[in-house]
């Protein structure tokens, strides 16, 4: 899950969120002002779901989700966050999206005529 801090203050998320993996930094655990950060590199799905700080920051509009390089709006971020981990994986992990697509082809629930995937 990729987030961007659009507030005027650093946002505490979890001590596992690190600025650098080799050296402790006083900003570890924070999403800094203006920073775009992939939280999935530091936190697993369970931690993302259980983080009250993350939930509160998204609901307050201080953090927005980012897909590709485009930040979502506050409302879009709240909808995606509320959809849960299945939707997060579909949006933020292209391998999951590809697996779901191919699974639809194999099971016959998707039929596409003259489609190129690449």
Image (tube, rainbow, N blue to C red):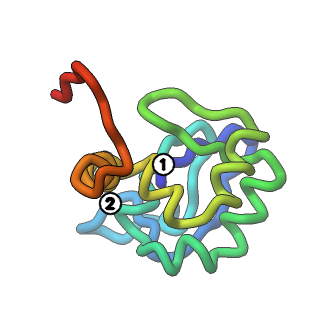
Residue 35: % across, % down: 53, 41
Which numbered tag is attached to residue 84?
A: none
**Residue at horizontal 50%, vertical 42%?**
36
Would you name the residue on which mark 2 appears?
A: 20
Q: Residue at x 32, y 60 (%)?
A: 20
Few, some or many residues within 10 Å of mark 1 (<14, 14–19, 20+): some
Give the side of residue 100 with respect to residue 12, left or right. left
Seen as rendered, the residue at the extreme top is 114
Q: Nearer the viewer, residue 114 or 59?
A: 114
- Check the image and report above or below for 75 versus 96: above
Q: Position of residue 94 (x, y in %)?
A: 31, 46
Observer-nearest of 36 and 44: 44
Asked which secondary structure carries label 1, the reply is: strand
**Viewed as shown, does residue 39 lie left or right of 71?**
left
Where residue 21 appears, x then y in whole percent?
Answer: 28, 66
Mark nearer the N terminus (2 vs 1) = 1
Q: Quadrant of residue 69?
A: top left
Q: Which residue is mark 1?
A: 2
Asked where in the image residue 51 lies, by quadrant, the reply is: bottom right
Q: Where residue 52 appears, x then y in whole percent?
A: 71, 74
Q: Looking at the image, do the residues carrying marks 2 and 1 touch, with CB atoms under 8 Å apart?
A: no
């Amino acid at each position: 899950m990729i987030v961007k801090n659009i507030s005027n203050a650093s946002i505490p998320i979890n001590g596992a969120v690190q600025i650098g993996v080799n050296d402790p930094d006083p900003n570890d655990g924070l999403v800094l002002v203006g920073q775009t950060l992939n939280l999935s590199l530091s936190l697993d799905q369970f931690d993302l779901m259980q983080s009250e700080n993350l939930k509160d920051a998204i609901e307050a509009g201080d953090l927005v989700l980012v897909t590709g390089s485009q930040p979502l709006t506050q409302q879009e971020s709240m909808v995606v966050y509320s959809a849960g981990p299945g939707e997060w994986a579909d949006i933020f992990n292209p391998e999951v999206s590809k697996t779901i697509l191919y699974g639809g082809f194999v099971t016959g629930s998707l039929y596409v005529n003259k489609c190129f995937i690449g």
